[in-house]
Amino acid sequence: MQFQGVMPALVTPFKSDGSIDFPALEAHMTQLREAGVSGWVPCGSSGEYNFMSDAERDSVLEFVADFANEGEFLIAGTNAPHTAGVIENTRRAKALGYDTVLLATPFYTKPADSELEAHFKAVLEAVDVNIVLYSYPDKDGIELSYELLDALADHPRVLGIKESSGSLQRAIGIASRYAGRLQLISGSDDIALDFMFWGADSWICGPANCMAKAVCELDRTYRAGDLDRAREQMTTLYQAMNSLESGKFVQKLKYGCELQGTPVGQCRAPLGPLSEAEKADFKAAMAPILDW
């Protein structure tokens, strides 16, 4: 399976009473499809998976799988703080129609390389799914090392790595070291164009929730070979991307959805709402994107 295009790391809409707002999710995904996304990645960190019960996560996965059209990529976030939990989450996702899952390191524990190798291999042995690894050291506290990737890269069901370190050096290292073995998938949104240049054919993109038209057009512009235009588009996107990376990422995604006309509610606690000043700053950064 070769991933291509922009796959939004979906937010999860919540009603004012805290329950999942499926009509809002349908409206949101309909707008994203119209913008040109290539698939769906529910129940990742942008989707606040760690704030939801197993039943809620399953309901979101089921809804997204039912909404998806043939030919659209489906990747389920099935992370948990322990291996047994990941296996159970992955089994349920498989039963709901997901052949590929996105897995970061188990959070909080900071396992060693040998422990992580055993963890990922245990999931592969327990469930017949493909895995996209997810390296996000700022959030998880550790980086998926080259030694660990060496141990996993030739497994036929380890397809690639979503690299969210924000390091271009890592992107170049992965692209050159694992050419033909692991797909480099962009997860560093503010340098996504650089990732494309170094071989990332796909982008699991949180900002696509609130700027799908713009990021999909950037992807198409680059694929068409118009590098000057792609640089101009990335320059326009950069201020908002940089604001997202500066903090309160999910809150800003959700506020951006409101600005785009598909409100998805607030985040669950402990994530609090944006201040009026934070809203004003992000709205200003989003202005050229809203007029895309």
Image: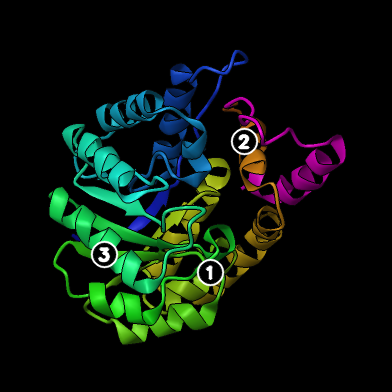
Give SS at disc 3: helix
- Residue 208's x, y, as percent? 51, 47
- In the rendered view, would you say 28 is above or below 76? above
Query: Which stretch appears magenta?
Result: 264-292
- Residue 9's x, y, as percent? 45, 46
Q: Is residue 21 in view?
A: yes
- Residue 100's x, y, as percent? 24, 50
**Left or right for 2, reference 241:** left
In space, the residues marked 3 and 2 are separated at their CA atoms by 36 Å
- In the rendered view, would you say 176 is above or below 89? below
In space, the residues marked 2 and 1 are separated at their CA atoms by 22 Å
Image coloring type:
rainbow
Q: Which of the 4 quarters of the picture holds residue 15?
A: top right
> Of circles 1 and 3, which is in front?
3
**Left or right for 138, reference 278:** left
> Of circles 3 and 2, which is in front?
3
Residue tagged by mark 1? 165
- Density class for disc 2 (Cα within 10 Å; few <14, some 14-19, many ≥20) is many
